Image (cartoon, rainbow, N blue to C red):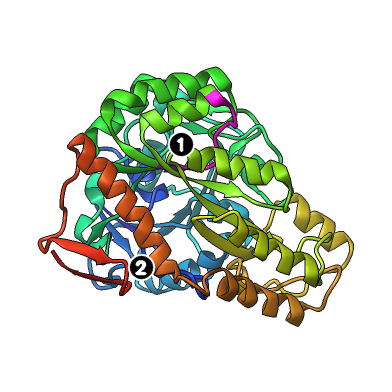
Amino acid sequence: MKIKLIYPKWPKLQRQTDFHLPPHGPVCFAATVPGDIELTFTDEHVEAIDFDAHADLVAISCMLTCQISRGWEIAGIYRAKGIPVIFGGIGTQLHAEETMQHADSVFLGEAEGRFGQIITDLNNGNLQKVYDYKNNFPDINLVGPARRGILNRELYNYRGVQMVDLIHASRGCRFNCFPCCTPFLGGNEFRPRPIDDVLREIESINNNRLFFVDNSMSQNDQWEKDLFKALIPLKKKWVCHPIKDNDEILDLAAEAGCWYVYQAIFDTSDHIRKRVKRLQERGIGVEGTIILGTDDQSEDDIKRLVDFLLEINLDLAEFTILTPFPHTPIRETLAQQGRILSNDWNRYTGGEVVYQPAKMSPSKLQDLYYYAWDRFYSDSSQNLKMAKLFLKVIEKEKADGTYQHTSPVRRKWDVNKDVVSPE
């Protein structure tokens, strides 16, 4: 049997540097496909889909709301050829009922230990319309190493520089943040993988740079300490979402190779100022994730926030507009108040205003979004700021003997000209 796994493209944020990370969902799913199945993969961000290639089943993996419509289009092409299509991924789960109209089957939930049943049903001509495992999570011990062999690694370099490989050490999140759909998707229970399993997977990855895509690393202090201690001998360099603001944990993170963290920044408080400073003092960069358009923000508040980010010397900033994604607390609130202006999922990128803000017009918030990007990067482009972070990690790798080239042409960033040139 031949399965074609496809990851549809989606519109990128305007102003954001255009690069592509190797996707995580598809390689995790691929690990659940029985070994006797011939599996091929296309990431539409980096290569075109060959619609003429034979397949017995097309599996479409969707992560984002703004990706789902393209997935439906792709499904329509294959179904017109008589090839069955199954959808999965967290984006599919957010849009399950709609997706059923475009698919022969929809898989909801986590796939470990379960996809073999789909193969059996397909072979018996009994593919089910829905395989619903929402809130019925598999034993975390069933989560094995992602199947990264399906990736064309040469397509995931940025200007000749090796990008990160994605990995997760846990699932679920005990926090319940208002713009987030993680509780609906992965549950409110923190589900850590056995650390030895995580280490074995890391050791199998031919890449010194990793991105822990866990929802938050700061859900259990002892687990966080144990993980970071175990990472130290591997000498990997890694990125993650927030870690606990605790001296011991921060020191361990730095020693374990933490390169930079994504940190939500929502105000101009001393708490945020100190948190960023404490990370940077340990050689850990900070990329701020900033949501614009919350009900407490006025135009002046947003402008002050951007000035604050420059004042604290944030390494990178990613601005998004508050977006009422399906199955989030904020969508429920805005829907009850009649403030959702559009359900065009292609606009749900985080870069467009699709609701009525509380303290300004939609067009004013859209203008402030562009203002925030342009103001923060007015003295130094995002490409250049990103290059400086990569230069820092390269120096760390050279210092501990782990630096390696992955591109046929050895390259370096010229941070004065904001270009990459042959080394």
Q: Residue at x 43, y 47 (%)?
A: 126
- Indicate which disc, 2 or 1, sits on the residue closer to the N terminus: 2
Q: Which mark is residue 45?
A: 2
Which residue in the structure is indicated by mark 1? 282
Against 233, is 206 above or below? Answer: below
Q: Is residue 264 left or right of residue 75?
A: right
Circle 1 — which element? loop
- Dominant secondary-structure state across the stretch colored magenta: loop
Report whether 130 appears left or right of 410.
Answer: right
Q: Position of residue 75 (x, y in %)?
A: 43, 67
Question: Mark 2, residues whose alpha carbon is within 10 Å: few (<14), some, or many (≥20)?
Answer: some
Segment colored magenta: 239-247
The amino acid type, in three-letter code, at marker 1 is Arg
| Residue sitting at x 45%, y 68% | 382
Say which quarter of the image contains residue 60.
bottom left
User: In this orientation, does residue 206 appear?
Assistant: no
Residue 266, magenta (yes or no): no
Residue 65 vertical position relative to residue 282 in the rendered view, above or below: below
